Amino acid sequence: MSQTKLRNAVAERILRIREGQESPYLRVVREASQRENVIRLVRGEPDIPTPAHIIEAAKRCLDTGHIGYTPPGGMIELREAIARKFKRDNGLVYNPESEILVTAGAQESMAVSLQTLCDPGDEVLLANPHYMAYPTNITMAGGKPVYVPTVEEDNFELNPEIIESCITDRSKVLVLVTPNNPTAGVLTRETLEGIAELVRNHPDLVVISDELYEKVVYDGFEHVSFATLPDMWERTITINGFSKAYSMTGFRVGYMAGPADYILAATEPRHSLSISTNLPSQHAALAALDGPQDFLDEMMEEYHHRRQMMRDTFDKLGVTYGEPQGGFYFFANVAGSGMDAGEFAAKATEYGIIFSPGRAFSEGAAKYIRISYLAPRDELALAMEKFTQLWNDCLADK
């Protein structure tokens, strides 16, 4: 079948993104949406309802009947609340008027950061496996993703020495995602300090620190914001948002913070993408930060239970994984099934469960699946029964 004129006109840099074809992840999501009677353990979308006071704040805004633009940086009241949050939770000081941008989700912060940092051919260092939107946005910005390998045996934690081995004279940006999607790994203070030392030794290297999952951590893990480390504040863009901590994925509110001169340069590109984050969502985000926070403890108690349910199943079957210290996923090694992860994930749909093959997050992750525990406990228990049946049937067929 011949291609249309528009398809033939697609820019070369876009064709470098999976040759312009659908990604494995989006294919799984599309197929999941078309199936009935399946348990979906695919997306990173919290199933716990958004707290009522957040919903009410959005409703009150809608009831005014005046829903317009805000400044591209966001409502000053929200930026002030974000500045208070940074100081309270992270030990970071930002001027809300000049050093914070509110965006349409943390993903827009990612896009703005990369668009404003990358010249053609600049290399961006990124942990592998990785959240698939990063290489897409790096490529659209004209940059080149350089993958820094991580391994299950180290809980998929970045190693400063391996980062160093990947640096070239074209390296410009280092992306840190902690806690990590898809691996659920984290970067400890010791590791971050090692990375900061490496960055100090490369005067032109700057850092994007994606901390979207900072509230979803386990076992007393201490989340450390990279910009708090010596000499890192002026070299770091800190990205965060509301989707994961407050179950606000559909509201699309994120934010980025950095030195005033950089934020000034980023403001017009941010404005050009979406003008401003929608007003009811900004009011909801303000309520999330200034309202009661006991929801977070209740959320984490629930996630602890679900994580243990999945861990118990995997340990019983002999399925290995990196220790999930943040987020709500297991990046699990299914090589013992005798199938690669793509085949295993496809077969799982016959059993009524859907999760992502590892190749959605790295071409080299053929042994792994990303499986979330974002389902009510009774549904998750049934999913684990189905997974056990699938696993045992695969072993019987080997």
Image: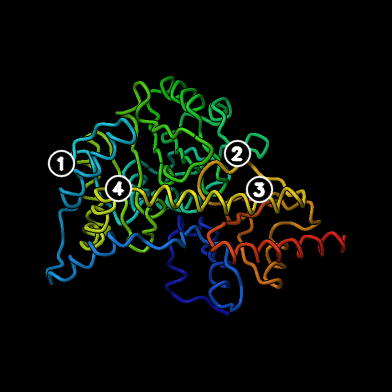
How far separated are the C-alphas under marks 3 and 4?
31 Å
- Type of amino acid under label 4: Tyr
Q: Is residue 61 left or right of residue 90?
A: left
Callout in the foreground (3, 4): 4
In the drawing, what numbered circle is on residue 389? none
Q: Identify the residue under disc 4.
A: 255
Dot 4: element? strand
Marks 1 and 2 in Cβ contact (< 8 Å): no
- Type of amino acid under label 2: Phe
Q: Identify the residue under disc 1.
A: 97
Bin the neighbour count of mark 3 within 10 Å (Cα to Cα): few under 14, some 14-19, many 20 and up.
few
Dot 3: element? loop
| Residue 73, placed above or below residue 229 | below
How far separated are the C-alphas under marks 1 and 2?
37 Å
Q: Is residue 231 left or right of residue 25?
A: left
Callout in the foreground (3, 2): 2
Q: Position of residue 269 (x, y in %)?
A: 25, 51
Q: Position of residue 39 (x, y in %)?
A: 60, 69
How far separated are the C-alphas under marks 3 and 1?
43 Å
Of the two numbered discs 3 and 4 on the same chain, state the one appearing first in sequence: 4
Q: Identify the residue under disc 2.
A: 156
Closest to the observer: 194 or 19?
194
Closest to the observer: 302 or 73?
302
Closest to the observer: 339 or 35?
35
- Type of amino acid under label 3: Gly
Q: Identify the residue under disc 3.
A: 364
| Residue 232, placed above or below residue 19 | above
Callout in the foreground (3, 1): 1
How far separated are the C-alphas under marks 2 and 4?
26 Å
Of the two numbered discs 1 and 2 on the same chain, state the one appearing first in sequence: 1
